Structure formats: structure tokens, C-alpha cells
Image (cartoon, rainbow, N blue to C red):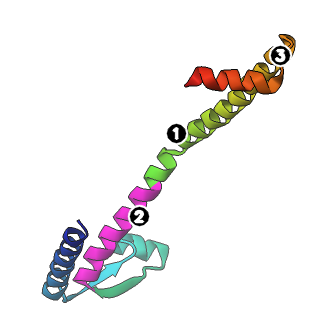
Amino acid sequence: MRYVKYLFLALLAICLLTIAFANRDLVTVTLLPGEMGAFAGYNASVSLPLYAVILGGIAAGLLIGFIWEWLRETKHRNEASRQRTEARRLKREVEVMKSQKAVDEGKDEILALLEDGSAAR
């Protein structure tokens, strides 16, 4: 399986390099459209190879998607955390109730725990 992963990564690298070599021409990327830039009084622009614009757009899209998904899943993470806390609280409560039951019945706490352990098997 490791070799399949390396083969896939090598093919991906070859494809990306082929795209980069085929799209080396410079393009000018501007921050705002012409009229908006004139109105704002500032319009930054930079000349980059086309492959850098394409790969940068893909990388920016992935980054925005990861951040968006992380923010969307916040409610699920909070709910899972709340349920873990509740489960720990209930487990402690059950243990306290078991020890109180053994004391109430006049049994030794150790024997009560051993009986609970043998019943679980």
C-alpha cells in the first residue's frame, strides 16, 4: 500500500510539473477592477506565471474549505465534549451508588465490588 501511495504522489508531481511548464507565461493579477481601483485611489497588481495563479487558487480554495468545515463542525465538537463530560459524571455517580448500596446492605465494600465484577463476566 505504501508503494501505491508513492506512485500516486509521483504521478501527481509529474502532472503538476507538466502544467507548470506549459503555463509559464506571465499574467497580471490586480486587486480591484479598473474603475473600482480608480475610485479607491489604490489598485495593487503583480505579474505572476499562470501556473502560480492556478496552483495558488487551488491552495486558497482548499484552505478556505478546511476553515469553513472546521467552523461548521464546531457545534458537533461541543456536543461531543458535553456528552463525554456527562458520561464521566454518570460513571462517577454509578460508582458512588454501588458503594453506598454495599454499605447500606451491611456488606464489605470490597466484597460488593468483587460480586459486581463476577456478575459482569
Residue 53 in which image quadrant: bottom left
Q: The residue under label 1 is which amino acid type?
A: His
Q: Nearer the viewer, residue 49 or 108?
A: 108
User: What is the crowding at mark 2: few (fewer than 14 residues within 10 Å), some, or many (at least 20)?
Assistant: few
Q: Count residues near mark 1 (Cα–Cα under 10 Å), then give few for <14, some for 14-19, many for 20+.
A: few
**Helix, strand or loop under label 3:** loop
Q: Are marks 2 and 1 in contact (CB under 8 Å)?
A: no
Mark 2 vs 3, N-terminal side: 2
Nearer the camera: disc 2 or disc 3: 3
Q: Which mark is residue 76?
A: 1
Residue lying at 49% horizontally and 45% vertically, measured from the top left? 73
The stretch in magenta equals 49-67
Residue sitting at x 62%, y 37%? 84
Say the numbered circle drawn on residue 56: none
Q: Residue 57 or 83: which is nearer the viewer?
A: 83
2 or 1: tag closer to the N-terminus: 2
Horizontal side of 66 relative to 16 (left or right) equals right
Amino acid identity at mark 3? Lys
Q: Position of residue 56 (x, y in %)?
A: 33, 75
Q: Which type of secondary structure does the marked residue at label 2 adopt?
A: helix
| Mark-to-mark CA distance, 2 and 1 | 21 Å
* Residue 2: % across, % down: 25, 69
Q: Within the magenta stretch, is there residue 63?
A: yes
Instruction: Please give the residue where the numbered disc 2 appears in the rendered image.
Output: 63
- Whether residue 2 appears in magenta in the rendering, the answer is no
Position of residue 98 measured from the top left corner of the image (x, y, whole percent): 75, 20
Decide: marks 2, 3 in contact (CB < 8 A)?
A: no
Name the residue beneath numbered marker 3. 107
For badge 2, the amino acid type reads Leu
